[in-house]
Amino acid sequence: MTLNKEEKASKLKAIKSQLPADSHLLIVSKTRSEDEIRAYYELGHRDFGENRVQELAEKAEHLKLTCPDIRWHMIGNIQSKKIPQLLSVHHLWAIHSVDDKELVQKLLKASDKLTDSVNIFLQYNTSKEVEKSGFEDYASLKEAALLLSSQSKIKLLGLMTMGTVRTDDFETEARRCFKDLNRNKNQLSSDLSKPIKTSMGMSQDYKIALEEGSNWVRLGTMLFQ
C-alpha cells in the first residue's frame, strides 16, 4: 500500500513530535522510489539513508535539481571498490557504517574526491552477533577515531550501533546495546575532548533508543506503508 501525501504528512508529524531537541529522524529510503523520497522532501524533510552505493548514487543524481537541499546518509556495508563512487555522491552528508580502521584509512585516502566535508559514524558491534560488522573493543574504536580527529573533509561525528536480533528479550537487549554505545561515546568524547553523537534505533526499537538519548533514529518501512 502506498501512502498519499496527507498520510505521509501525518506519519512524519507523529514521529517528529516524539523527538527530543537534539534527536533527528533519518528516513531509510532504500528500495523506495524517487517520487516517494521527493514527497517527504516536499513535506520539509531533508535526511535520507540508503544502504547500497549504486542506488544512492543514482537517486542523488536524479534528485539533485528537484531536491537541492537533500542530505544523503550511507547506512550499508561499503566495498572498497565503491568508495570513489560513494564520495562522489551529490549532497553526501554522512556515512553511518564505517566498521573498521582499514575502511577509515581508505576513506581518508580517497577524500580528494570530496567537494564538501562528510560526517562519519563509527559502527560499534554492541550485540557481538557474528553477522554484524563493527568495532568490538574500545581500544580499536579510539584508534580509528584518532585518525579522523584532525581531518577537515572526513569528520568524526559519532558512533552507530544496532540492537540484538537473536534474543528472547528484545527490549532488554536493545537497551543494553544502547547503554553500551553511550558508555563508549562518553569515554571517547572525554578522550578526544569533543562531543560525540549517536546513531541508534530503528523501527522496532527507536523509542527505547530515544529514551537512551539517541541523536539519530533510522526509520524506513513504517513511513512508507
Image (cartoon, rainbow, N blue to C red):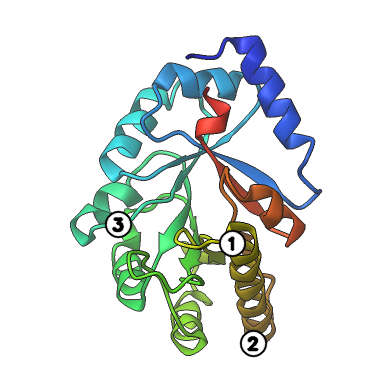
Q: Is residue 65 left or right of residue 25?
A: left
Question: Looking at the image, which is closer to me, 84 or 180?
Answer: 180
The amino acid on which the numbered mark 3 sits, given as a three-letter code, is Ile
Q: Which mark is in front, 2 or 3?
A: 3
Q: Residue at x 61, y 79 (%)?
A: 184
Residue corresponding to mark 3: 78
Q: CA distance from mark 1 to mark 3?
A: 31 Å
Q: Which mark is in front, 1 or 2?
A: 1
Quick one: label 1 or label 3, which is nearer the N terminus?
3
Q: Is residue 73 left or right of residue 51?
A: right
Q: Which mark is residue 86?
A: none
The amino acid on which the numbered mark 2 sits, given as a three-letter code, is Asp
Q: Residue at x 72, y 53 (%)?
A: 210
Question: Looking at the image, which is closer to me, 43 or 212?
Answer: 212
Task: Answer few, some or many: residues within 10 Å of disc 2's Cα (few below 14, many 20 plus, some between 14 and 19).
Answer: few
Task: Answer few, some or many: residues within 10 Å of disc 1's Cα (few below 14, many 20 plus, some between 14 and 19).
Answer: few
Residue corresponding to mark 2: 191
Which residue is farthest left?
81
Q: Position of residue 140 (x, y in %)?
A: 43, 85
Q: Position of residue 18 (x, y in %)?
A: 78, 40
Quick one: label 1 or label 2, which is nearer the N terminus?
1
Residue corresponding to mark 1: 169
